Image (cartoon, rainbow, N blue to C red):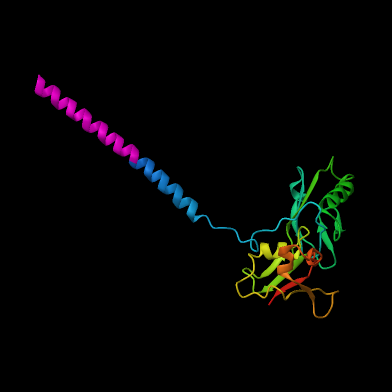
Amino acid sequence: MKPRSHTIWCLRAVSVALLCTGICYGQQRVADAGKTNASSVPKADPRTAPAVAAPQYTIGSGDVLNIQVWKEKDLSQTVVVRPDGKISLPLLGEVYVVGKEPSQLEDLIQTRLQSMVVQPRVTVTVTEIHSRMVYITGEITRPGAYPLNTPITVLQLIAQAGGLTQFASKKKIHVLRASGPAGGIWVNYKSLLQGSDPNHNLQLNPGDTVVIP
């Protein structure tokens, strides 16, 4: 009987060891999978990610609007603001939208639909911004066009674009503006960082180009 009991005890010990090994291996695979999934998720580029406008944003030509009418699927759609500042909507026809905030356009559409739809509820979202852009070029990490969906200064745009390169001339940055001087508006980056010249931290206008020599 003793040899048989000893054999059974050994088999149980081996089974427990195998079970523990399987659990540890499974946990390691889950951990490795988590690391792989986390590292494989691409980081969003601020220039290519969809730019959704802030609520106070004013709509312009070229912007893409998503208009949702509650419980009215046929009236809900995505439209592009035409160069003449108008969009075409079912039942309403032509609607001039340039210069309006999303909330103002919601009120306008709801008012016009009241005679045709019971208690219309409208939501307007600017899903793509094309009318209000600023540009940055030269010795900058990520040059290109950036949506101006909220007020932004020269320093903020430089930060958003990844900062200056090591070759940038920090004292000769200038902003090209349609209504500004021919040579641009000069900005001393070093003075801005030191806080000695805060007045030159310009708030950018749509169409401005920041040049980093």
Magenta segment main secondary structure: helix
Q: Residue at x 29, y 34 (%)?
A: 19
Give residue 135's position: percent from left, percent from top: 72, 70
**Residue drawn at 17 percent across, 25 percent down:** 8
Q: Kindly identify the residue that appears in the image at 33 percent across and 42 percent down.
A: 25
- Is 84 colored magenta in this rendering? no
Inspect this view and state whether residue 189 appears. Answer: yes
In the rendered image, residue 15 lying in the magenta stretch gets the answer: yes
**Quadrant of residue 137 within the rendered picture:** bottom right
Choose between 152 and 133: the one closer to the eye: 152
Say if residue 131 shows up in the picture: no
How many labels, in total?
0
> What are the residue bounds of the magenta stretch?
1-24
Q: Residue furthest bottom?
A: 182
Residue 34 drawn at (x, y percent):
45, 47
**Foreground residue, 68 or 60?**
60
Does 66 sit above or below residue 169?
above
- Residue 79 placement: quadrant: bottom right
User: Which residue occupies 69% across, 65% down?
Assistant: 158
Query: Residue 63, position in %: x, y?
Result: 76, 62
Most foreground residue, 113 or 154: 154
Q: Describe residue 89's horizontal placement relative to residue 4 as left or right.
A: right
Measured as percent of width and height from the top left, residue 81 is found at 79, 62
Identify the image quadrant of the C terminus.
bottom right
